[in-house]
Amino acid sequence: MRIYGAAGATTAVPAKATRRTAGGAFSVPGDSEEAAAPAAPSPLRMAGGIDALLALQGVEDATERRKRSVTRGRYALNVLEELKLGVLAGTLDPVTVNRLRAAAAGLKDSSGDPGLDSVLAEIELRVEVELAKMDPVQASD
């Protein structure tokens, strides 16, 4: 029986052949020949183990990356909208500025889609501009 896994098929090691005498009687190997001890069975190997499972969990497809990037972009635009409304109403909340900083950090990751990445770069630039405008406001509070 062959087991195919990550390392391929494993084969058994053939036992050393014993010498036969002309009379057909059983003979034990002599001092000059080493007695072959039976090989211990090798331990079973998992197809990849825990490391492979963790690596597979870390692999993400392009669709997931794109969805996550779109979500981060929408979140940043929503926070920018809240910031605009807060400035116009004169009720700027420091929590909104902190949320904007957090949104800016999430926009730096690549989505793998050049068009989406360029839109996210423009959103990130807008967020950075608004944060730069808010820094003097934060310092005067």
Image: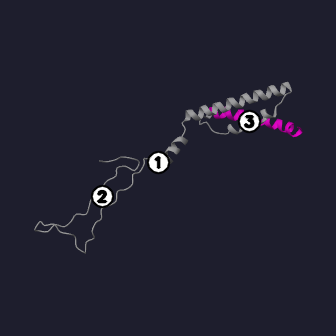
Task: Note whether 7 is above or below 56 in the view shown.
Answer: below
Q: Quadrant of residue 59?
A: top right
Q: Quadrant of residue 116?
A: top right
Among the two numbered marks 1 and 3 on one chain, the one whose residue lies closer to the N terminus: 1
Label 1 CA crowd tier, 10 Å (few <14, some 14–19, many 20+): few
Q: Position of residue 100 (x, y in %)?
A: 75, 34
Residue holding disc 1 = 49
Q: Marks 3 and 2: which is nearer the front?
A: 2
Give the residue at x 69% y 30%: 75
The kind of residue on which mark 3 rests is Leu
| Residue 87 relative to residue 16: left or right | right
Confirm whether the magenta stretch covers residue 125: yes
Among the two numbered marks 3 and 2 on one chain, the one whose residue lies closer to the N terminus: 2
Disc tally is 3
Task: Note whether 91 is above or below 58 in the view shown.
Answer: above
Give the residue at x 68% y 38%: 106
Residue holding disc 3 = 125
Query: Which residues are the magenta region?
Result: 115-141
Q: Position of residue 25 (x, y in %)?
A: 13, 67
Q: Is residue 107 visible?
A: no
Task: State the SS at label 2.
Answer: loop
